[in-house]
Image: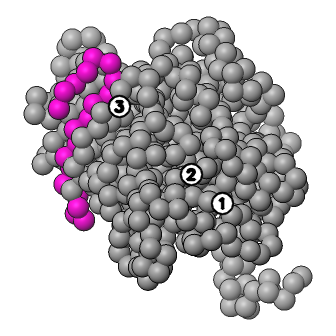
Amino acid sequence: MSESLNGLTARIDVPRSEFTIDVDLDVPFGSTTALLGPNGAGKSSILTTIAGLADIADDAEVRVVVDGRVLTDTSAGTWVPPDQRRVGIVFQEHRLFDHLSVLDNVAFGPRSAGARSSAARRAATQWIDLLDLGALVKRRPHELSGGEAQRVAIARTLAAEPHVLLLDEPLAALDVTTRSEIRRVLRDQLRAFPGPRLLVTHDPSDAFLLADRLLVIESGRITQAGTPDEIRHSPATPYVAALTGTNLYVGRADDGSVELADHDHRFTITDHTLAGAVMLTVHPNAVSLHPAQPTGSQRNTWAAVVEIVEPLGDTVRVTLGGPVPIAVDVTPEAVAALGLRPDEPVWAAVKATEISVSPA
Amino acid sequence: MSPTRRPPWILAVLATIGAALFVLPLIGLLGVTPWSDLTSLLTDDVVTDALRLSLVTSIAAAILATVLGVPLAWVLSRIDFRGRSLLRAIVTLPMVLPPVVGGAALLFALGRRGVVGEPLADATGLVLPFSTWGVIIANTFVAMPFLVITVEGAMSSLDGRHEQAAASLGASPLTVFRRVTLPMIGPSLRAGIVLAWARALGEFGATITFAGNLQGRTQTLPLAVFVSLDSNRDAAIAISLMMVVISVAVLVVLGGRWWGRTA
């Protein structure tokens, strides 16, 4: 594995009772990689190993390098303590210090780096302002809502000026509305963070919306790597297909329809009250294919072109091009009946009730 | 009274007898108290010397037990080493050992002819037995286990997640201890200090064995009560009453704030 001078490389080979975690990671400077996989796939262990917070067993092989600096190397007996790694981590549960105010929580990193109390608070205030936490500075963590606490936790991690940013399921503990708010905050902060960013999540929408690159991990191994589009369009395993199959779009809602941001298409939805930026998902099962334009009320229909037809377990995954790229799962019988082949035209239809929309 | 709160009669009877065990001695003490002579009895040199000495030595012992006991509790809860269980057993031994045995053991170790005491006296001229320092050491010996087990229990119940977060923010192990671990166990630490101080204030056996009974130097309030019982019964009663008042005052002042809260 090549180790660039800019970025994070990690080689982790850790035997566990159920399976062996065996991954090679390479997160370039200034990019966000998402480690996507089910609970218990070993994602969090990878993060805590990189951060130096996990015990390393005798039979494990680990090498972690950040910007050319070796942080862990079991073959050479190298292990830099967590407080000297400059590896920042945002946890699923915020882990704020309840005996300190919001301001002092955020100032904790600068204080630990040796700044005086007043200088540390000044440094913290910049992050407080950036994350719009000014009204909360005097509160204690137990007086915050889940979303506020996670914003403070993000500010606290960034204020320590880490060289690498790790995020361990940062949205998993939040309710749906808060999740989209914090996801927006994270998207902005990830973009602004200069070093490598590694996000661990089990939620494909988080991975697709926040990362440039995805690594899918199953039972301790990376089963697929690529950009969100690559992974969505050609899933390597049935699990990846099921995990990432959901079609996800961003757009603007207005009076019962959504204008997609990246595609020349408008979806009709049932909710007439939504307005502004939204995230829209369509399950591959919810799309039906027809030889001609179908009729019926409340339907989204459009003419498309078949791009890829591939078997996926008992069903067939059809990837459509045209105005809106979309993955569709159909039965093998339907493929035969419709004569679905690459480059053939087909009509696609989705009921408005099958489209789920949430504020983005 | 709600029906669910009505105790079965057998529990009520036993609880009443149990309560009587605490209430009756108090009534007995108040009944024999020479109220008219109280002021003169309590301003006697013997009493004021013992009171001053008791306060100084018990507070010094509480401080010493905290300064040494908190790091000891941290090591016992955080560091995995051979003999940890044995060390924990030895540290808690003074809680079950008769204090007079502890005092004798201190004498053999730190006495003028003791294994540590003799070289210490030769090198520095410091002789611990029968000195105020001896009282402080005997008090610390019996009081520190209360602090160690309270603090160690609280530290072990922390799951380490906040300490990990602090380390990843760049805090050295000492900073993590000072700014995260200690504040998080604050209520238990305060309870441990109070327990240790209360135990030191009431200490008798180890003190009289190791430090003797010299007025103004090693005669604390409990020792003063003991010697006065023979010579001056009224003085013994007056001092006892004073100790009850001090103890009750401490319980009342600390009660609502510390004991009621779960650590």
The percent position of residue A37, horizontal first and vertical second, equals 40, 56
| Residue B149 on the magenta span | no
Dot 1 and dot 2 residues touching (CB under 8 Å):
yes
Q: Chain of mark 1?
A: A
SS of the residue under disc 1: strand
Q: Is A118 displayed left or right of A206 in the figure?
A: right
Cα distance in 3D space between marks 1 and 3: 39 Å
Q: Which sits in the foreground, B111 or B83?
A: B83
Q: What SS does tag 2 mark?
A: loop
Q: Which residue is mark 2?
A: A322
Question: Which label sits in the foreground, 3 or 2?
Answer: 2
Label 3 vs 2, first from the N-terminus: 3
Q: Residue at x 54, y 16 (%)?
A: A110
In space, the residues marked 3 and 2 are separated at their CA atoms by: 33 Å
Q: What's the mark number on residue A302?
A: 1
Q: Which mark is residue A27?
A: 3
The quarter of the displayed image where residue B16 is located: bottom right
Q: Chain of mark 3?
A: A
Q: Amino acid at mark 2?
A: Gly
The foreground one among B61 and B117 is B61
Quadrant where the N terminus of chain B is found in the figure: bottom right
Give whichever of discs 1 and 3 has the lower sequence position: 3
Please state the extent of the stretch shown in magenta in the rendering. Answer: A1-19
